[in-house]
């Protein structure tokens, strides 16, 4: 089995509309708390598995999984008013990032 884990300062994120002018890290809003967040994953496989469970518009948008350095994820999240949560393959929050 291929090991797709990366060092602790890099995480995998789901990118909406990659390589376009509208490219962005896919974010969500918690229905109960209304808190906005970006999901990040420790492995590419976790991101792939969780992606299957997340709400998305496959007919209008394209998606890809990218490895992004921690500081860039946090900066992007802050600019968009989001938090970052490390999630597992089932979509459970493991820990906040930053």
Image (tube, helix red, strand yellow):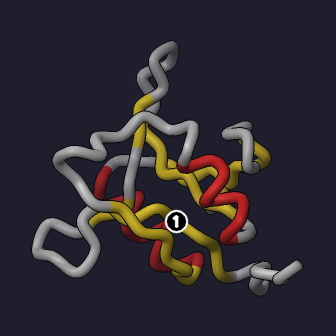
Q: Quadrant of residue 15?
A: bottom left
Q: Quadrant of the C terminus?
A: bottom right
Callout 1 crowding tier (Cα within 10 Å): few <14, some 14–19, many ≥20:
many
Asked whether, in this view, residue 16 is left or right of residue 43, the answer is left
Residue 62: give x, y in percent of width and height: 28, 60
The residue positioned 46% from the left and 78% from the top of the image is 72
Camera-nearest residue between 39 and 63: 63
45 relative position to 83: left or right: right
**Is residue 81 or residue 14 the one in the foreground?**
14
Residue 13's spot in the image, x, y percent? Answer: 52, 65
Give the x, y percent position of residue 6: 75, 84
Q: Residue furthest right?
A: 1
Looking at the image, residue 3 lies above or below residue 16: below
Looking at the image, residue 23 lies above or below residue 87: below
Q: Which residue is mark 1?
A: 13
The location of residue 90, given as percent across then percent down, is 73, 40
Q: Residue furthest top?
A: 32
Q: Is residue 63 left or right of residue 85?
A: left
Q: Residue at x 74, y 67 (%)?
A: 42
Identify the residue at image location x=50%, y=49%: 83
Task: Check the picture and name the quadrant holding the N terminus.
Answer: bottom right
* Residue in the picture at 49% in, 67% down: 74
Task: Answer above or below: position of 33 versus 76.
Answer: above
SS for callout 1: strand
What is the number of callouts on the image?
A: 1
Q: Quadrant of residue 8?
A: bottom right
């Amino acid at each position: 089995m291929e090991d797709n884990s990366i060092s602790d300062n890099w995480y995998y994120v789901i990118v909406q509309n990659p390589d376009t002018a509208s490219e962005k890290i896919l974010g969500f809003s918690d229905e109960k708390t209304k808190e906005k967040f970006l999901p990040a994953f420790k492995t590419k496989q976790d991101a792939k598995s969780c992606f299957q469970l997340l709400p998305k518009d496959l007919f209008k948008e394209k998606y890809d999984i990218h490895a992004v350095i921690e500081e860039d994820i946090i900066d992007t999240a802050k600019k968009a008013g989001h938090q970052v949560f490390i999630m597992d393959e089932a979509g459970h929050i493991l820990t906040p990032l930053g």
